[in-house]
Image: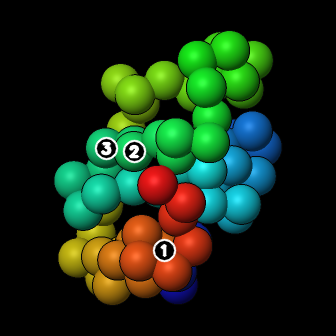
Amino acid sequence: MFNGFLLIPNLDIAFDKGLITFDDNGAIPVSSQLDEIACKILGINSEMELVKVEPAHKSYLQYHRERIFKP
């Protein structure tokens, strides 16, 4: 139940591929593999954030940051 987020398609794909992730406060770190042009095309910017992160999401987010995200 807490191992997923409802994201728009461009963010969902980037998240699944490890090109973005979310910290425990919902902020969006962006992989260095995405340059400014790619971010603009994908509609991704560093000011985006999740509206709400439940405590139960945090272990899944930590896993994603440690094992999937490509800094």
Q: Is residue 43 left or right of residue 61?
A: right
Res. 64 mark: 1
Q: Is 13 drawn above or below residue 61 in the view shown?
A: above
Q: Is residue 60 visible?
A: no
Q: Amino acid at mark 3?
A: Ala
Vertical placement of 30 versus 55: above or below?
above
- The amino acid type found where label 2 is placed reads Pro
Cα separation, mark 2 vs mark 3, equals: 7 Å
Quickly name the residue at label 3: 27
Is 70 displayed left or right of 17 in the figure?
left
Which class describes the residues within 10 Å of circle 1: few (<14), some (14-19), or many (20+)?
Answer: some
Residue 40 in sight in this render:
yes
Q: Is 61 drawn above or below residue 60 in the view shown?
A: above
Residue 32 percent across, percent down from the top left: 52, 41
The residue located at (46%, 55%) in the rendering is 71
Mark 3 packing: few (<14 Cα in 10 Å), some, or many (20+)? some
Q: Secondary structure at mark 2?
A: loop
Closer-to-camera residue (32/6): 32
Discs 2, 3 touching: Cβ within 8 Å:
yes
Say which label, 1 or 3, has the lower sequence index: 3
Residue marked by disc 2:
29
Q: Earlier in the sequence, mark 2 or mark 1?
A: 2
